[in-house]
Amino acid sequence: MPTGSILIADDDPAIRTVLNQALSRAGYEVRLTGNAATLWRWVSQGEGDLVVTDVVMPDESAFDLLPRIKKLRPNLPVVVMSAQNTFMTAIRASERGAYEYLPKPFDLKELIAIVGRALAAPKQAATAETAEMEALPLVGRSAAMQDIYRVLARLMQTDLTVMISGESGTGKELVARALHDYGKRAKGPFVAVNMAAIPRDLIESELFGHEKGAFTGANARASGRFEQAEGGTLFLDEIGDMPMEAQTRLLRVLQQGEYTTVGGRTPIRSDVRIVAASNKDLRILIQQGLFREDLFFRLNVVPLRLPPLRERLDDIPDLVRHFLSQAEAEGMPAKTLDAAALERLKRHRWPGNIRELENLIRRLAALYPQDTITGAVIEAELAPPAPVASRGPASYGVDSLAGAVEVYLAAYFAGFGNNSPPPGLYHRVLREIEGPLLSAALASARGNQIKAADLLGLNRNTLRKKIRDLDIQVFRTG
């Protein structure tokens, strides 16, 4: 049977009653108060083995009380509860030495489990209080975001490598910046690199730098992103697009803490925290031979999945207010959305996630004269695009492939009206063109993949992979 004395401070009598019943039934001795002064008196008298306290109380905030508690009794675990379920609440609780942070409404079973772990855990000294932070880098109070906040709060004062996964537009770089800006490397640089935006043959030079004469055009020594991020954080976005050669170099940095520049021979020690991100499933890339498994395990020390917006629809009102406030700070007219507008936003699927919502809100703030945006306006903005006609140069009434692409793109953008198209247009157009091109080449070569590869100017293994990835049917006719 569990034993221990628990001090509970909450100005809501109903919550005190519920906690008293649950923890008493679990075998704990419970003392209840509705104010911070009484809680402090009990703590200063040496009472209690654990504290459960709300943040907001009538006489003092728990965040103001926590440092005094940790200074007087550093080994006394404190569980903080709050209805102000923001990223900064979790961070402040962690900074001030709270054992755990629980958003309201909370699960009683989870609370009891936390109490049991806290009383059984080895006692540790409190961490030092840091400066008050006012920025709000992440927005949302949903259960999904509360889990993210709590993980981030635990990671802030570590150098653990973090692997962020999530769809495009879910805010992966925002999370990486929060890890840096509120962590122990905040005074160092934050350097972000998007692997998909760099030509593959330049990625190694971009990351690790190069020496003069290392390759054609290398007229002087150039520093890489690792050198630029020294003492800080290096955010490697879209890590799944990193070529194998660069993966091998990155693995050496993670294993040995050093690297060499392209064309260089002297190892350079690296003091950089790595945060990586991908909107692809790296395990699938490993199966396809496109990503090193040993590198994946080195990067995936702390996996962090960001939920798509459709899994956190309750956060839409907070996000809307946040984006409207940003737009107003940039000089756009002040706006609000009525209840019908917010409800219509919650019914949308949001394929572009938070980025799509942000673009919509900025467009509403800039283009609509009314102070209050109605549900009818949102309905018109989110109306599905008009269908696009069948593909092919002939169907567009043009002779060249380039002309067909231009007409296709014009129709594509027109179909979205005032809406911003979802990200990924480059790959979308490639898929539209690549499949028919490969099929035509194979047909011309009568299904002979060697001849088709020569016709296309591709390596045979590359052609085989594309045939498999695009699910192209190959028929030999001679």
Image (cartoon, rainbow, N blue to C red):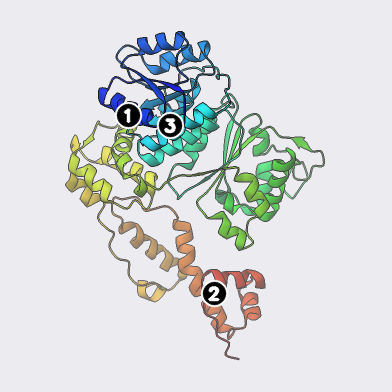
Residue 21's disc number:
1
Q: Is residue 251 above or below residue 441?
A: above
Residue 411: x %, y % from top left: 33, 62
Q: Amino acid at mark 2?
A: Leu
Q: Are marks 3 and 2 in contact (CB under 8 Å)?
A: no
Query: Which residue is situated farthest in the front direction here?
Result: 1
Could you tell whether 187 is left or right of 94 in the image? right
Observer-side mark, 1 or 3, equals 1
Q: What residue do we see at 27% from left, 22% from top? A: 12
Could you tell whether 1 is left or right of 37 in the image? right
Q: Are marks 2 and 1 in contact (CB under 8 Å)?
A: no
Please tell me whether mark 3 sits on a helix, a strand or a loop: loop
Q: What residue do we see at 56% from left, 72% from top? A: 468
Q: How dense is the environment of label 1, judged by Cα within 10 Å: few (below 14), some, or many (20 and up)?
A: few
Q: Name the residue tied to disc 3.
A: 137
Q: How dense is the environment of label 3, judged by Cα within 10 Å: few (below 14), some, or many (20 and up)?
A: some
The residues tagged by marks 2 and 1 sit, at their Cα atoms, a distance apart of 69 Å
Q: Nearer the viewer, residue 73 or 281?
A: 73
Observer-side mark, 3 or 2, equals 3
Q: Amino acid at mark 3?
A: Pro
Residue 177: x %, y % from top left: 51, 34
> Where the C terminus falls, by quadrant?
bottom right
Mark positioned earlier in the residue sequence (1 or 3):
1
Could you tell whether 399 is left or right of 478 in the image? left
Q: Amino acid at mark 1?
A: Gln
Residue 438's disc number:
2
* Total count of labels: 3
Q: What residue do we see at 22% from left, 45% from top? A: 343
Q: Are marks 1 and 3 in contact (CB under 8 Å)?
A: no
